[in-house]
Image (tube, coloured by chain):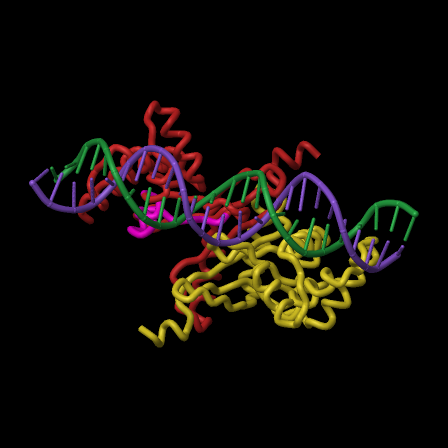
Chain colours: A yellow, B red, C green, D purple
Amino acid sequence: MVQAADWVGHANETLARGGYRASTPRAAVVSALADLGCSVTAKEISDRIEAGGQEVGLASVYRTLELLERLRLARRVDAGEGTARYEPVDPAGAHHHHLVCDRCGEVAAFEDIELERAIARLADRVAYSVDAHDVTLRGECPACLGRD
Amino acid sequence: MVQAADWVGHANETLARGGYRASTPRAAVVSALADLGCSVTAKEISDRIEAGGQEVGLASVYRTLELLERLRLARRVDAGEGTARYEPVDPAGAHHHHLVCDRCGEVAAFEDIELERAIARLADRVAYSVDAHDVTLRGECPACLGRD
DNA sequence: CTGAGTGCAAACAGTTTGCATTACT
DNA sequence: AGTAATGCAAACTGTTTGCACTCAG
């Protein structure tokens, strides 16, 4: 997992360096994304900001997420159903993938070097030039398994 | 890739066995999905049917896809952007994953035993009970690479 | 003071649903 | 005949966009 504080600093720095203005709504989105961490929706970000007493229009949340994605500060991850999810990108390059529960929708993260290696080797063999990959495992989370 | 003819037969059989009626629109969707093969949208299916002279409401396409998915005859695959894509499921169990071109959206398929093995091993180690997985590689397709 | 960034509301795209009608079995 | 399945149109959901206003630089 990305260190929330580090990432917020890194993100704000990158934004400033890019000539983007430091607006309150933007900062709120950055900070909410950092707090929520892995695999969050625009709505969740907006709610979290609202819970903190601020108001930020959903449109601004989307615009900020789009910007963060363009700057490689965040990435869109696909949990499957039709709702876009985002998460902070670790500046150090570490990354993880997701386990999604088909029953309750819960998302967990995992890392696996062996998997990464297999993908790296594969990437060399294909005709495409690969610069990103996503892996999603689907099944049932421990909680749902217990509740059978 | 799934053998189109085989799959159509298999799908129709499964549908019949399940007590589902053999309607013309349903058959058209099954056959269109088989023809188009890998990673198609509801709209593409509808267009392809229309091109063959028939008319099938988009709603029926969606309803049929949902049914096929429930019967494990098709699966929803996530190419990333907000449009659901479907493809026939090989009754023999063979499956592949996708390479998506970030520039033109072109989707190619690949298989890799090593990758499957890594995922199988990983699936044993996690707390979730994993029963499906998706891998998507993103990058640029050969055509777009050439067009730099 | 100037334009990047915002909020709102309207526009959109894909998907789902209610209901009267059609057509397998 | 009975009911599963269809088609249409309306409803919905998530996301994007146009525009007037605001505020950081």
Whether residue B3 is visible here, answered yes or no, is: yes
**Residue shown at 55% from the left, 54% from the top:** A84
Q: Is residue B106 above or below residue A50?
A: above
Of the pair A28 and B126, the residue shown nearer to us: A28
Q: Based on the picture, tell me whether residue B76 belongs to the magenta stretch.
A: yes
| Position above or below: C9 against A86 | above
Quadrant housing residue A139: bottom left
Q: Is residue B72 or residue D18 the one in the foreground? A: D18
Q: Which stretch is magenta?
A: B64-78
Residue B29 versus residue B79 in the image, above or below: above
Could you say where residue C13 lies in the image, as x and y percent from the top left?
52, 39
Number of callouts: 0
Q: Nearer the viewer, residue A28 or B81?
A: A28
Q: Quadrant of the C terminus of chain A?
A: bottom left
Position of residue B131 measured from the top left corner of the image (x, y, whole percent) = 38, 61
Query: How far across and how far down the image is residue A136, in percent?
Result: 49, 59
Q: Is residue B121 in sight in this rendering?
A: no
Q: Is residue D9 left or right of residue B12?
A: right
Residue B102 belongs to the span the image colors magenta: no
The extreme top residue here reads B53
Residue occupying the point 66% across, 64% down? A55
Q: Residue, x 67% and y 61% (percent of image)? A: A56
User: Is B68 on the left-hand or right-hand side of B137?
Assistant: left
Q: Nearer the viewer, residue A59 or A97?
A: A59
Q: Position of residue A131 (x, y in %)?
A: 64, 50
* Residue located at (78% from left, 60% from top): A23
Q: Quadrant of the N terminus of chain A?
A: bottom right
